[in-house]
Amino acid sequence: MADVELGQQEAEELALRACRGAGANEESARALVDATLSAARFGPATLGFPHMVDYLNSFREGRINCSPAPTLMRPLPAMLVCDADGGVAQLGFDLAFDDIVGAARKAGIAIFTQTNSYTAGELGYYVRRLTAEGLVGLAATNANAMVVSKPGGPAVYSTNPLAFGFPLGEASPPMVIDQASSSTAFINIVAAAAEGRSIPRGWAVDENGADTEDPEKAVGGALLPFGGRKGGNVALLVEMLSAGLSGGPWSLDTPDFRSGSTRPAVGLTVLAMMPGAPGEGHIARAHEQTRRLAGLDVFIPGVSDMEFPPSPSKRLAMPASVHEAVRAFAAAGSA
């Protein structure tokens, strides 16, 4: 089935109605839709509207608190600690955002750490927002275990993504690196299964630990880390940054974010950093370096092949099955 294309305002209104139809309160709906639209416009398309369906199902099935009351504490001058109260991760980040930016500008660095939320969605969203404020961002999160440390071993980590953003000035979009510690993101396995496509060898193993090209078997098995042991080390690093710093559950102890009624309650850590002292020109220097690398045919994440400035009239595409699911939730809210 062909993709369905919507104007940005049309897509936003549909997504808001769907969130309300799934039971989310207005603050949660707004936070999630902003992040979803950002992913659809700038991030991997699979982490936009396709992943939003996971949120909609989880609102309805109890894995997300539909009316949370996040709490924010400041135990140290440059540290913000949030309990998301079982809600979406984006809402807690919204609550703390101005304080994160203010602390980073004052102290040079700020740490936001959060626990007790649903999965963080597109991780690049968090650092992209910081780059819009002229700050360098680093973000890490975990979820339920679905990645083995080595073939044949048990699943011990989530895909444990790491995102990094560096502002490049008003003449360029920011550099944003957002990648999983696994060979691919779990949502890519789900998409391949839904579309009946095979997956490359080296992405995942089946329930017996054997390498598989069948996404259905991969969903019932586990993902592999990228680069073998080195990717496993990165997954462990992310685990410590997210669950370790936040006090949230380790991936081994986190419920599945796509089934059941138990909230995942995962961790998220975001660092915001000043790109040098004021007046040092590090942003302009970084921009020049990315231009230099691009001239040598180096792919610059977030910059290469990115329309800039972004067009507000650009239409957003979503798979027909995803559009149908989102419309069903929206219709439920109107009934």
Image: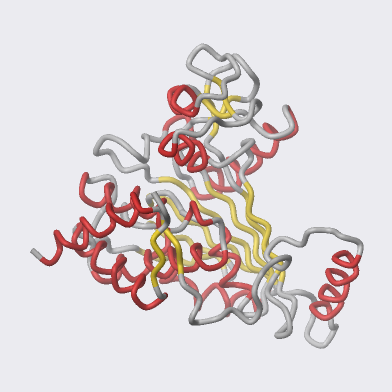
What is the quadrant of the C terminus in the image? bottom left
In the image, what residue occupies the spot 84% across and 58% down? 298
Can residue 326 be seen here? The reply is yes
Name the residue furthest left.
335
Query: Residue at left 28%, top 47%?
Result: 58
Nearer-the-camera pick, 157 or 332 = 332
Q: x, y percentage for residue 116?
A: 38, 50
Evaluate whether residue 106 shows in this view.
Answer: no
3 vs 241, nearest the viewer: 3
69 displayed left or right of 255: left
The x and y percentages for residue 91 are: 38, 65
Q: Position of residue 299 (x, y in %)?
A: 78, 58
* 259 relative position to 195: left or right: left
Q: Is residue 335 left or right of residue 317?
A: left
* Residue drawn at point x = 65 percent, y = 65 percent: 137
Which quadrant of the view contains residue 271? bottom right
Residue sitting at x 50%, y 82% = 312
> Given the current orientation, which residue lies at the most extreme top position?
208
- Residue 144, percent across and down? 45, 35
**Number of marks:** 0
In the displayed image of the protein, which residue is found farthest to the bottom?
A: 279
Splitting the image into 4 quarters, where does residue 311 fall? bottom right
Q: According to the image, what is the colour scheme of the structure?
A: secondary structure
Q: Is residue 226 above or below residue 40?
A: above
User: Position of 258 compared to 36: left or right?
Assistant: left
